[in-house]
Amino acid sequence: MKFLCLDCDDVMVFAERQIPGDGTLAAVFTCGSCKREMAMLTNPMETQFVSSMGIKIGGREVPAQPMELTRTSLEGGRGDAFALSEDIPLSSADPDGTPTGRVVWTTDAVGRLERVPSFVRGMVKRIYTDWARESGVSEITPEIMDRARTELGLEGM
Amino acid sequence: MRRIRTYRDVTHDTGSEMLEQVVDQQRRLAERLARVRSVVAVASGKGGVGKSAVTANLAAALAGRGLAVGAADADLNGPSLGRMLGVSGARLADRPSGVEPAQSPSGVRVISMELLQEEEDAPVRWREPGMGGFIWQSTLETGVLREFLGDVEWGALDVLLIDVPPGTDKIGRLLELVPALDQMLLVTTPSETARFVVSKSVRMAREAEVGTVALVSNMTGHTCPECGHVSDLFTGDGDKRLEEESGLPLWARIPFDPRLGAATDSGTPLVITDPDADSSRAILGLADRVEEHIGIRSAQSVAEADS
C-alpha cells in the first residue's frame, strides 16, 4: 500500500499512527515534496485485517514477541499456559537472553501488571523490562509504565 | 487521461514498513526451520481418516528410535494432537528466543492450540470487531500457524511433523509458509470418497514440488479379536486405485484397531503400549520409510548447489 501525492507526483511517507481504542485506526502520511498531510482511516474490520497479518503500519517500536499474534488474538486464553518462573530471563535485549541490567518492579507496578490478563502477562512484562533497561531505568513504577506505553505505542498494555 | 504512476513505478520507501515486517516474519520462520532436518506434513484433504492418530503414533515411533521429534498441531479449530500425545495441561516456558514446546512422555515436543485454551469445550474464537471474519480469519490463522512453526523453540530436530487439518486449502496455506516441505504423507482410506478428495491433495502436492509424497491407507480392515477373520470397513478399493492412478508409493496400510483410538484417547500412542499390534507394526513400518527419507531434500539441494 502506497500513497502518491498527485500534485507533486511524489510518494507520501508514513508519519504517525493513532489507535483511538474503538477498533479503528488512523495513519498519517505526508508528501515528501509539498508536505501536505493525509490520514488513512480504517474501520474495525480493516484494522483487524492488518493486525491479523501480525504487522503494524509504520513499523514496530518493540520487536515482535514470540507468539505475539496468537496471544493477543486468542479469546479465552489459558491463564497459566505460559510459565512465568523466575529462572526465565526477562530480557530480550541481548542475544544470550542474559539480563544486562537489574530492573526492579515496585509493588504498585506489580499490582498493575497483575491486572494484565495472565495469558499475555509474561510477554508484557518482558516488553516493559526491556524498555527500562534500554532507557536506563532501574525501577519500574506505574508512572514509568505509562511513559513506556506512550513511547512504545502499547495500546491496551 | 493523465497517467498515474503504478504501485511498481513508485519505488521510494513509504516508511509504512509493512513489507519489511512480512519479510522479517519469513526470515524468522526460515531460521527456525533451518534447524529441522525434515519437515513432514501429515495431510489428506479429507476429514475423519485418522491423520492425528497417525501423526501421534508416528511421532512417538520416531522419538522411540532416539530421533529428535517435534509435532505441530496445525488443526487450530479442532486440536487433538496434544491430548493424543499426553501433554494436556502442560505449561509452556516463555523465553525471549521463543516459546518452549510441551514435552510428551514419549519424548515428542508438541505445540497445539489445546495447550493455550482455558476451557476444554470452548471453540477457538478470536478477538474481533464482530463482523467480517470471512475477510481476516484465514489471514489470522495462517499467522498463528506461522508462529507455531517459527516462534516455538523447537531446537535441533530430526523431524517436525505437522498435523494438517482437512481441506486442500489448509495444505495450500502450509505450503506457502513452508515451500520447501521435505515429505508429505497423504492419509486416505479404502473408500472411494476418500480417493476422490485425496486425489486433489495429490495434485496440489505435485504442483508444489514437495520433496517426497507418499500415501498412507488407514482403517484398511478389521481383525476380529475372537476368530481372527479380517473384514473390510469400507467396500471400495479407493486406496489401491489412488496408488495406481497417482503413481505414488503406498508406505503403509494400517488396519483398524479400536485399541489405537483408545490408546491415543489416553495420551499414550499404541506404538508405545502395544508395539506388536498389527496397526502398530504398520506405523512402525511407516516410521522406517519416513526415517529413510530424512534429509534427502536438503542433500539434493546441496548437490544441486554444488553442480
Image: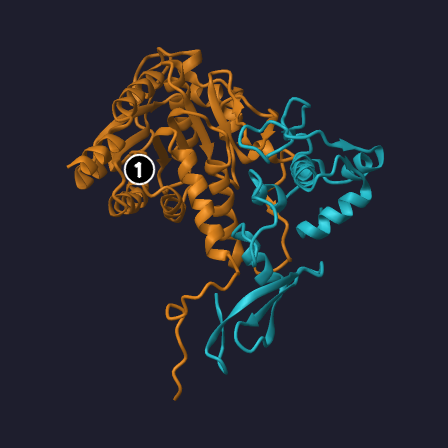
Chain colours: A cyan, B orange
Q: Looking at the rendering, in which quadrant would you find the C terminus of chain B? A: top left
Please determine whether, in this image, residue B273 is positioned above or below residue B247: above
Question: From this viewpoint, which residue is outermost toward the front?
Answer: A136
According to the picture, the residue beneath numbered tag 1 turns out to be B191
Host chain of mark 1: B
- Which residue: 60% across, 74% down? A37
Q: Position of residue B69 (x, y in %)?
A: 41, 23
- What element does badge 1 sit on? loop
B184 relative to B246 in the view: left or right: right
Q: Name which residue lies at 66% across and 39% down.
A: A120
- Nearest the camera: B283 or B30? B30
User: Residue B20: x, y in percent?
Assistant: 47, 53
Q: Is residue A101 visible?
A: yes
Residue B68 placement (x, y as % from top left): 40, 20
**In this orientation, does residue B163 appear?**
no
> Total of numbered circles in the picture?
1
Could you say where residue B243 lies in the image, as x and y percent from the top left?
Answer: 21, 36
Query: In this image, B280 relative to B248: left or right?
Result: right
- The answer to whether residue A56 is above or below residue A137 is below
Local crowd at mark 1 within 10 Å, few (<14), some, or many (≥20)?
many
Which is nearer the eye, B55 or A112?
Answer: A112
Q: Residue at x 48, y 65 (%)?
A: A1
Answer with the quarter of the image where residue B162 lies: top left
